[in-house]
Each structure stands twice: as C-alpha cells, then as structure tokens.
Image (cartoon, rainbow, N blue to C red):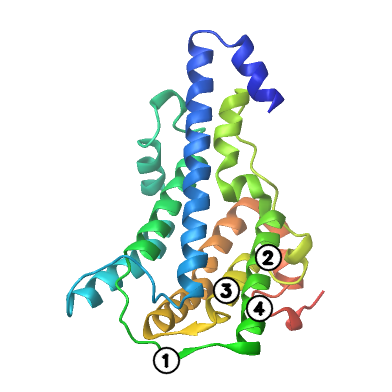
Amino acid sequence: MSACWRSLRHGAGADRSRVVWALGYGALCHVLFLAGVGAMVWAMYHGMSRSFGSLPGPWSLVGNAVLLLQFPLAHSFLLSRAGQTILRRLAPEPHAGTLATTTYAMVASIQLLLLFLCWTPSGTVWWEASGSSLWILTGCYAMSWLLLLKATADAGIQLQSGMLGWFALLRNVRPRFPDMPTSGLFRWVRQPIYVAFALTLWTVPTWTPDQLAIAVGYTAYCVIAPLHKERRFSRLFGDRFAAYQRAVPYWLPWARRG
C-alpha cells in the first residue's frame, strides 16, 4: 500500500493517469478473480445442481457444452501470439503490454463466472453425501482447494492472480516474471496446479450428470493442457527445464526420480 500512496502523492499528469489505470485494473481484476473462484467453489460443491441457467430441452445440452469448452479453448488461445494481440486491445494502448497478465486473469475470471453461473442444471441428482460422509468429503474438498492455493503460491501468486501486471504499472517498471518454479509442491510433480485442480473436481459431496461432465472434461484438460506449457518452458529455460523434467514426474508424485 505504501507504493500506492507514494505514486498517488508524487504522480502528476501522465503519471497520475498511469496510477489510476493500474489501481482500476487491479481492483477490477481481483474482484472478478474472487467472484469467479467463489462461483466455482459453490457450484461444484453442490454438484452443479444450483446455477442460474434456464435453457429449455435439448438446447440446455448445447449451451452447457459451449460453456464447458469456452474456458479451456480461450484460456489456451490467449497464450498464443494471436491471443496476446487480443489481450493488448483490452487495455489502454500505452499500458497494454504491462497489463497483459492482468487482463488475462480478468478474462479467465469472467469465463469462470459464465461457466458456473450460467450452467443449466439437468435436475438429476445421483448421490448426495450426508452424515459423516458429508463431513469427510467436505474436508477433502476443502483440502483440495488449499492444495491448489499452495501450488498457486509456489508458482508465483502475483502472476497467477493477475497482480503482476497492474502492480508493475503502478510502480512504472516492467513486469518481472517469476523464475521456473521448482520448490514447494513443484519438487514432487511438475504440474501441481493442474493436479490440485483435478482433485477439486472429484472430491465434491454431490454427484450429478452435470458434475461428471465437468469432472471428466476438465480432468482431461488438466492432463493435456500442461504439455503446451512445458513446450513453452523448454523454449524459455532450455537445459534447466530438461534436467527438471528428468528428475521430477509430470503428474504422479510416487514416480519421482530425483
């Protein structure tokens, strides 16, 4: 906060405009981020049986399929060169490059809100935990989210939350991306964020056809999507990442080799 106050106190003209853009994008990014994650936690806890979508008949299947696919497709596309060009159009031109990671997190959060708030429930509940099983599964669900939070922190919480871009703009510096993560949960598997997210999909206390579709679809995404990320890391970190790949398994921690 001290950096915010110093920037506001000493900023003038263009500098003051930069500070306003930084704080505005930062506030919007984190509100959307918390709303998106909150909607996801709430909706999956209830097995996707409580949402606000209301498409009739077979159109609900089409609508849900579009909602299911839009997140992984757009999430991956925005990491490409063409996607980066689009992200730069979502911020004012002088600051578009600096705010790219922030706008990326904002778009992802909006996608989550669309998915989990606009889903049309099937109305079918296969199984709902009660008694001791409810407490056990709720505990497992909470632990899965804590594991995801830990993995996110190990990867660099500023980058993952969108803070990297707006905070760099606030300080008028270039965004400094974190180094290749190898500590914490990254000592055991190369993709702990995806592993932890997959666990959240399967530890819910309510099972419906809707939740099964989410769990199967996004577990497949969690297995396949990091391959693209690893190709990018190979280009960025070269032999360092190759050595890391040889020592640490992709997904299963008990296969650790180093």
SS at badge 2: helix
Q: CA distance from mark 3 to mark 2?
A: 10 Å
Q: Is residue 208 left or right of residue 171?
A: left
Location of mark 4 (residue): 140
SS label for mark 1: loop
Label ID, residue 126: 1
Q: Marks 4/3: CA distance?
A: 8 Å
Q: CA distance from mark 2 to mark 4?
A: 10 Å
Can residue 55 be seen here? The reply is yes
Per the image, label 3 sits on a secondary structure element best described as helix
Mark identifier at residue 146: 2
| Mark 4 neighbour density, 10 Å: few (under 14) some (14–19) many (20 or more) | some
Q: Residues within 10 Å of mark 3 (few under 14, many from 20)?
A: many
**On the image, numbered disc 3 is attached to which residue?**
200
The residue positioned 53% from the left and 29% from the top of the image is 23
Pointer 3 or 2: first along the chain: 2
Q: Residue furthest right?
A: 258
Q: Nearer the viewer, residue 39 or 94?
A: 39
Q: Is residue 256 left or right of residue 108?
A: right
